[in-house]
Image (cartoon, rainbow, N blue to C red):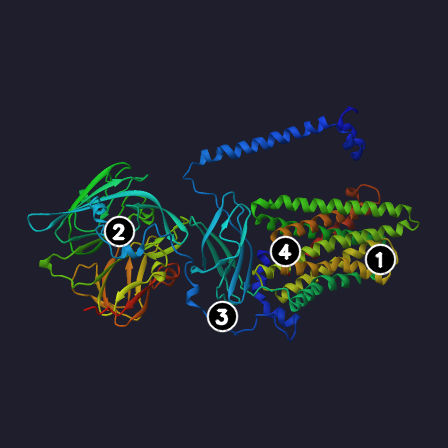
Amino acid sequence: MLKLTRRSWLQATGVSSLAGSLVAGTRLAGQGAGVARHPAHDAHVMGTVGRISADGFTPSTFLRSWNFSDLAPEERAKFYRETPRPDGTLLREYEIFATDREIEIAPGVFFPAWTYNGQVPGPTIRATEGDRVRVTFQNLGTHPHSIHFHGWHPPSMDGALAGQEVEPGETFVYEFDADPFGVHLYHCHTVPLKRHIHKGLYGAFIVDPRASSGSRPPADELVMVMNAFDTTFDAENEVYAVNTVANAYLHDPIRVAVGRLVRIYLVNLTEFDPVNSFHLHGMFFDVYRTGTSLTSSERTDTLMLCQGERAILETTFRYPGDFMFHAHQTEFAELGWMGLFRAEEPRRDT
Amino acid sequence: MTPDTGAGRAATGMTASVAEIAPRQWLLALLPLVLLVGLLAAIVWSGPADAVRGGGFPPVERLTFQRVTLEPGAIVVSVMNDGPDPVTIAQVQVDEAFWTFSADDGTVLGHLARTTLRIPYPWVDGEAHLVKVLTSTGTAFEHEIPVAVETPRPSARFFGVFTLIGLYVGVIPVVIGLLWFPFLTRLSSRSMDFLLAVTVGLLVFLLVDGAHDGLESAAVLPESFQGVVLFALGAAGAYLLLEGTGAWLKSRKASDADAPERAGWVLALLVAVGIGLHNFGEGLAIGSAFALGEAALGTLLIVGFTLHNTTEGLAIVAPLARARQRVALRDLLKLGLIGGVPTIGGAWLGGFVYSPVWSVLFLAVGVGAIAQVVGQIARQMARGGSPVRAMASGPVLAGLFAGFVVMYATGMLVG
C-alpha cells in the first residue's frame, strides 16, 4: 500500500503540503523551514567508539620504529642483524614471515588479515644507501606470497615474475643493495594482487642517503602508511586509516615538540581508491617526492599520492596545541583517516 | 478407527476421552517427547554442524533493522539479531562517516536479541541518510532513510493529525459512499445483480492489493518470523472467524420472522467488517510510513485514498439495496463507522508503535476478511444455485469488470 511506489508520491509532495491542507494554521512539529533545531555540531560525536585492545598492534609505537627497534635487544636479534662490510657499508639481515592473523582495525572491528610478521603495515625496513639488504622470507601463511621491493634490483629479486611466488611453508632470500635513497615500499606481488595487498601485505622501506650523497638534518621521524580495509570484500573500503587503526591518533595524539624539525615518511598503500592525500591544519610542509632528492620540490599543506606513491614531508611546529591532520578526501577522513598532532613546548632541563 | 481406541473415543467427546486415558497411555504419549529431548541434548552436546564448519569458519551474522526513528539531532535505530550466531556491534557509520553511538541493551546480541542504538547525528530535514552498522567481523548492515522527517511521538497534536487523516481517508469517504443507498433501492433487479458484481470486483481488487502489500512486507521480515507463513495464518484465521460469525448470524436469522430482510443486513454487516479490517491495515501503512522515517505524507496521497475508499461505501450498501429493505439512517451510519473508523486506529498504531510483524498480520487479516465477504456475496447472488453459474451472466461479468476498473483507476492516484 504505502511501499516503494507510493513513496515517490510522498517524496514529491512533502509533509508541508499535508500540514498546510489538513492542519491549517499549524505545523507538524519540526517542520519549521530554516529553523535550526539540531544541537551544535559537536566534532567529538564523529568518530569511532571505544579503544582498541592494548595487547595488539600499537600505532603510536609503529610510528617511530624501524628495523625492529620496538623489540627488546634479545628479541630484536632474532629478526634483525647488522654486519659491517669492508667498504664501510653494512650487511642488514632481516627475518620476515608471512602469516594469517586477525587484526583490530577499529575498536571492536576485526579483519582477517594476511600480515608480514603479524602486523599491518609490516615492519619498516630502513637501510643506508649502498648497504646490502638480505631478507629471509618465510611463508607461514595459507596462500602463496612474495615480497616485491621498490628500488633497484635484478629481476631475480623482483618477487613478482612468474614462478617467484613463495609457496606456504617455503622460504626465499631476497638480496639487493639499498638504492636509491628515499622513501619506498614493499608489498606482496602474488596474484590476485588486489586481494594480497588489501589483506595487509605491505610496509615501508626507507633508504637514507650515504655520506657522499649529503644528509638530512636530524629530526623527529615518523612513518605513516596510509591504508584502508574492505571488511565486506566488495572492492570498497569500510575503514580508512594511517597506520591501520581508524582514528588511532585522534584518541592518542602524536606528541611533537614546538620548534623541532618533524620528518614524515608518508606512503600510500590504499587499495581500491586511486588516490589518497595528506592535509595538515595550520601548517605548511616541504615535500620531497619519493625522497630521492635533498631539495624540496614544493611547500604545501595538502599532498595527493597515487597508490604506491610516497613522499618525505618536513615541517616545524610553530605553535603549541592540537593540529588536525587527515586525508583531504573528506570521505576517507570521516571513515577513520583523521588524527591529531599535539605540539608541546620543549622542556628546558639544562 | 475402532471404537475401543483412545482416538475413537476422543471423536465422540473431548472432555470425556481425556478423563478416560489411562496413566499408561499418557506414558506412551510422553515417550516420543522424552526421546526427542534426549536427541536435542545429544545434538547440542556433540555439535555435528561445528565439525563440518571447523574452528576458523566465520559466524553467520544477520542483523535486521526493526524501527528507525528520527529525533532532533539524533537517529535512533533498533536492531535485532535474527541469525543463528551471536552478533557483536562494533561501530556505526552514518553517511560514510564513523559516528559515536550508545546501545541501550548492550552491543552483544544473541539469537533474536534486540538493542537500540542512539546516534547523535545532525540529520537534515527532507534529505536521505544511510545508517551502516559494522559488526566485530567487519560485516556491514545498512538501512536507508529515503526522506528524513522527525518521527512523531505520541502527543495530543499527532493524535489529532492521525485522527484527521483517518477521518479523511477512512470514515468520511465510506459514509459518503453509503449515501448512494436511496438511489440504489430504486434500481431494477437486473441492475442490482450488476451492482453486487461491481462490489465483488471492488473487493477482489482490495484482496489482490492487500495480499500484494502483505506479502511484500512479509518478505522483508526477519527470517525467524517466517513472514509468508504468518501472512497465511492471519488470512486463514480471519476468514474462518468471519465464516463462523456469518454461520452464527444466519442460524439466528433462521428463527426470525423477518428472515429475508435480515439476510441483506447480515451481508452488509459482514462487508462492513471486512472493509473495516482492510482499512485498519491501510491506516497502519499510513501511520507506519511516518514511523519508519520513510515518507512524508502528501495531499495527493490523501486525495487518492479518499476517492478510492468512497467506493467501499458503495460495496457496503449494495446488499441492502438488493434486499429492498428499509434501513434506519442510524443503522446506515453504524455500518459506515464499522468500515471506516478502524483506519484511525490503524494510523495511531502504525504511527506510534510500529512493528513490521503487526503490519503483516493486519494486512493478512484484511485479506482473509475480504475473501470471506467475496464468498458470501457470491453465494447470495447464486440464490442457492451454483455461484459459478450465477457469475457467468452478462451484467454480472460487466459489473465485476467495472468494479475492478474503478478501483484500479482510483488506485492510480495513490501510486
Q: Which residue is more in the foreground, B110 or A192?
A: B110
Q: Which residue is label 4 attached to?
A: A1
Task: Give residue B97's position: percent from left, percent from top.
Answer: 42, 60
- The alpha-carbon separation of the residues under discs 1 and 3 comes to 65 Å
Task: Kindly check if marks 1 and 2 are in contact, taking CB atoms under 8 A apart as contact.
Answer: no
Task: Kindly check if marks 3 and 2 are in contact, taking CB atoms under 8 A apart as contact.
Answer: no
Q: Which residue is label 1 attached to?
A: B187
Q: Which residue is label 3 attached to?
A: A39
Bin the neighbour count of mark 1 within 10 Å (Cα to Cα): few under 14, some 14-19, many 20 and up: some
Secondary structure beneath dot 1 equals: loop
Q: Which residue is more in the foreground, B201 or B179?
A: B179
Residue flagged by tag 2: what amino acid is it? Gly
Bin the neighbour count of mark 3 within 10 Å (Cα to Cα): few under 14, some 14-19, many 20 and up: few
Is B281 on the left-hand or right-hand side of A306?
A: right
Which numbered circle lies on residue A203? 2
Do we see residue B381 in this rendering?
A: no
Bin the neighbour count of mark 2 within 10 Å (Cα to Cα): few under 14, some 14-19, many 20 and up: many
